[in-house]
Amino acid sequence: MRYFNSDIETKPLPQLRQLQNQRLRQLTAYLYERAPFYKKQLDEAGIQPNDIKGVEDLHRLPFTRKHHLRDNYPFGLFAVPEQEVIRIHASSGTTGKPTVVGYTRQDISIFSEVVARSLVAAGCQPGMKLQNAYGYGLFTGGLGLHYGAELLGMSVIPVSGGMTDRQLMLLQDFQSDAISCTPSYAQTLAEQLDKRGIGLSQLNLKVAILGAEPWTEAIRQQVEVGLGVHAINIYGLSEIIGPGVSNEDFEEKGTGSYIWEDHFFPEVVDKDTGEPLPEGEYGVLVFTTLTKQAMPLLRYWTNDITNIYYEHSYKRTHIKMGPIRGRSDDMLIIRGVNLFHTQVEEAISHFGHLSPNYQLVVTREGTMDSVEVKVEVEPAFYRGLILAGPWTEAAARNPTLYALQHELAKKIKDTIGLSMKISLCEPGSIPRSEGGKLGRVVDLRKM
Ligand code: ADP
């Protein structure tokens, strides 16, 4: 199976647009009638549902932002009676109340379909076993992958996140073909296999479907070698539906992830002005859910920074998005320079002796911000080092490590424009994901 829904995935663009336009017209009327929040938004903007003829009119509509969801906590944005809502999820929300989302039966079937499409794009097939190591619970990851994989006809092993011993046991005993989890947890699993001397020949893994946090090619490399898989990106957010808003194709790895735009219409806008940006330019990703019933959103401001573009050399017609650089609220501003941790990760990836296990520590002295990059050296390189005394002292005196430290500092200065302190660390000394998303930045300025 090459596509889960070949008709829609390969629909010629003019027809896809027609479908989107028709769905958007229906949606605007639906929300105006059923969701008091949107009636007010449209009235205040002086827009009548009839004014929206198609996606080219979207830019006239106001954005929906995360605080609108919080202001209407918990169920204020539902556009259907509560009895029609068959599932409720919520995102973690680091501060205050979580963001709540609801699904009708039809919403769940759309969610399952986009995940099934995503799994096929990732290289999964009916009959394969998926070890689902995304967290089950209020987080959309666990159940989202679960329903999609069942719809595709895979055998789902619902392990949930964490419990590394059990994950490794099941990978061997059940001979799972695929695993879904966060990329940082896939790093943990790869490392633990190596540490415990479990060879890849004892596993049957072919695909890892990774998402829920930003990751780069360096992590892909580490996971692909460590687990013996294709490591494939899945993206999504609970407000829009959950994982499966977009997904990479395993044969087009590294060229971006298909956005299932018959359901989720994307725009990229300038983060300061909100103006739509030309195809290919980086900005904030904004989605309109074209088909959701329980809680559709118009122009939802995701805060995620990326770009979107069409690629005409492949059969699927849907637009692609590049990797997420970070969330705009996770962006660090260091001495006036905007910084995402993934930029440092990218710089690290140029050094074979360094591993993609790293952490940024940001501090402030007076008015001066500084960043320390803690990064582990590769285990094999570490084993080959001859060091006299404990790591920190010996490392400072070792000419190879000293040179490596300087080269990384220079690479970061040249590419990002900031001077950072580099601390090379021993393998295993930086915190690992224990099953979920991993925070790679420790910002001590806020404390
Ligand atoms: P929470 O706000 O609790 O993290 P979600 O689980 O809905 O809630 O997280 C969605 C967010 O996770 C996205 O907006 C994005 O920032 C991040 N994310 C999800 N998938 C990816 C991915 N493949 N690459 C980068 N970031 C991702």
Image (cartoon, rainbow, N blue to C red):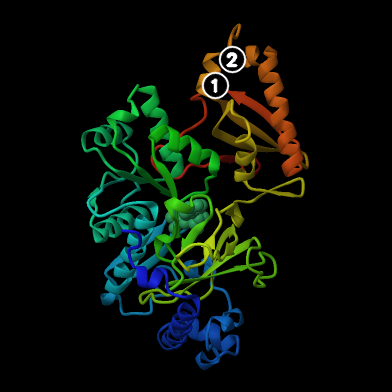
SS at mark 2? helix
Q: Position of residue 91 (x, y in %)?
A: 42, 57
Q: Are marks 2 and 1 in contact (CB under 8 Å)?
A: yes
* Number of marks in picture: 2
The residue lying furthest to the top in this view is 388
Q: Is residue 194 above or below residue 48?
A: above
Q: Position of residue 152 (x, y in %)?
A: 26, 59
Q: Can see residue 413?
A: yes
Question: Residue 304 lies in what quarter of the image?
Answer: bottom right
300 or 276, which is in the foreground?
276
Tell me the tag on residue 377.
none
Disc 2 marks which amino acid? Trp
Is 313 on the left or on the right of 31, as rendered? right
Identify the residue position indicated by label 1 in the image.
Answer: 426
Q: Residues within 10 Å of mark 1 (few under 14, many from 20)?
A: some
Q: Is residue 244 above or below residue 269?
A: above
Q: Can see residue 93?
A: no
Q: Is residue 94 above or below residue 296?
A: above
Q: Residues within 10 Å of mark 2 (few under 14, many from 20)?
A: some
Is the residue indicated by label 2 positioned so its CB lies within 8 Å of ligand 1?
no
Q: Position of residue 248 (x, y in %)?
A: 45, 55
SS at mark 1? loop
Ranked by sequence position, the earlier of labels 2 and 1 is: 2
Disc 1 marks which amino acid? Glu
166 or 415, which is in the foreground?
415
Q: Quadrant of the C terminus?
A: top right
Which residue is painted at 35% across and 57% down in the image?
Answer: 120
Identify the residue position indicated by label 2 in the image.
Answer: 391
Is 286 on the left or on the right of 224, as rendered? right
Is 205 on the left or on the right of 264, as rendered? left
